[in-house]
Image (cartoon, helix red, strand yellow):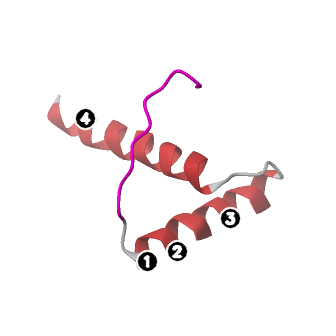
Amino acid sequence: MANTPTVTMRLPQELIERVDAYAKRVTGDTGVEVNRTAAIRALLVAGLEVKEKGKQ
């Protein structure tokens, strides 16, 4: 992913805490370390897939 653009955004503290909790939960469930960036990416992809399905 080294050639992907960097996107900077501001998020409310509550949302950051929810993302971090998700990352911690996935790490605990799978034993694979998930950082905030990976968690945001996974949640964004999952959310887009749900929303895009609704448009078809």
Q: Distance from label 3 to label 1 (Cα)?
A: 18 Å
Q: Residues within 10 Å of mark 1 (few under 14, many from 20)?
A: few
Q: Which residue is mark 4?
A: 52
Tell me the element at label 1.
helix
Q: Earlier in the sequence, mark 4 or mark 2?
A: 2
Residue 47, percent across and down?
36, 47
Kindly report which numbered mark, 3 or 1, lies closer to the viewer in this rendering. 1
Q: Quadrant of the N terminus?
A: top right
As measured in the structure, the alpha-carbon distance from the residue carrying label 3 to the one carrying label 2 is 12 Å
Rendering quarter of residue 26: bottom right
- Point out the tag, 4 or 3, that comes first from the N-terminus: 3
The residue that mark 2 highlights is 17
Q: Give neighbour class at mark 4: few <14, some 14-19, many 20+ (Cα, 10 Å).
A: few
Query: Disc 1 designates what residue?
Result: 13
Query: Which residues fall within the magenta stretch?
Result: 1-10
What residue is pinned by disc 3?
25
State which quarter of the image contains the C terminus: top left
Which amino acid does the dot numbered 4 rest on?
A: Glu
